[in-house]
Image (cartoon, rainbow, N blue to C red):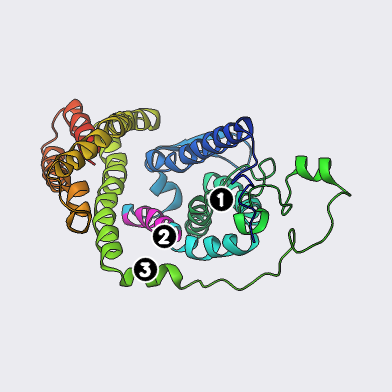
Amino acid sequence: MPNEDEPYVILSKTKVLALVLTLSFVNVLFGIAANLYVPSLEVVRRVSPRGRMRYVPNKRKDLHVSVEAINLSITVNFLAQALSPTIFGSLADVWGRRPIYVPVLVLFTIACVGVALTPYYWLLLVFRVIHGISMSTTVTVAIFVPETLRSLVGNGSGYANPSLYQWWTRRGTVEENVATCRPLKLSDFTAPFRLLLEPDVLVSLIFNGLHYSTIIFYSVMNSHLFATQYGLSTLQIGLTQLSSAIGSISMLLVHGKLLDRDYQLMKKKNLPDAEFPIHWARLRSVWVLALLVQIILVVYGWCAQIHVPLPVLLTLLFISKRAK
């Protein structure tokens, strides 16, 4: 039986803050690494066998493939991101976080180097799949952070999958007992898929999946559009993504208050808890924003077709991200 006087987490505030900052910083770096691929679809630099940098104006010519084939490398990456958590997430729930993070970190490093240097299209697809698998498993600096799976270490006082610091400070002092070692059990890999049988989950996934697909559409199309019709370099294409980034940041600052306002409006009706429409209270304004996103998508495609000035497209990107 658990001791009621025992704290839920024994980690100090300093350790918790250091853990959060470390993981946040590293995941930002991995996010940047993932997003570097799309702006470089059209213009890349390659190292020749003699060690000299040679400029290739079109990546498709370097790999001798079409635009559709290059876009396929993005598709397989996202498919890997979608499916891999069902495997690695289940394994992490049994073995702990760190035994999964370390090999995934190695996979991510290999994938980044491979994508940057491979001259073969089929090998590019392989590395993009590996890249997607490692990205979606939430890679962290597992060498330095402690194990956090509660079923293994409890509130942090347990000892399992130690970091280098834990192993050095506690070597020779931990006994093999039930509290620190437990037998592994085969995890149920089908559990995440069974959630699709829940109507609320299925509707939420479809809704968010459609909106996320528009984000990918913008990124992939803009890489080709800005390079061919506006003559932008790789760096300039990357800088155009700042409009989307600023829109996302402003969205985070405002949408939370919008959701709280909708909730408070419903709360003022003083409905009993059994009759309180919690879904409507939280999603009251979502349909307006969803409609706005679709309208902007149509307008953006039309503007791209008639070659409007670049600031117009960047403004539409900002508004679209702002609405999402």
Helix, strand or loop under label 3: helix
Q: Does 101 sit above or below residue 267?
A: below
Q: Amino acid at mark 2?
A: Ala
Helix, strand or loop under label 2: helix
Gap between marks 2 and 3, in whole Å? 14 Å
Q: Between residue 29 and residue 200, name the one nearer to us.
A: 200
- Residues shaded magenta: 68-80
Report if residue 174 lies within the magenta region: no
Question: Could you say where residue 138 lies in the image, as x and y percent from the top left?
Answer: 52, 49
Query: In the image, is 79 to the left or to the right of 110?
Result: left
Query: Dividing the image into 4 quarters, which one contains the C terminus?
Result: top left
Question: Could you say where residue 134 lies in the image, as x and y percent from the top left?
Answer: 54, 53
Q: Between residue 153 and residue 199, name the one nearer to us.
A: 153
Look at mark 2 in the image and give the residue it sits on: 82
Question: Could you say where residue 136 lies in the image, as x and y percent from the top left?
Answer: 48, 53
Q: Does 136 sit above or below residue 146?
A: below
State the image quarter where residue 243 is shown. top left
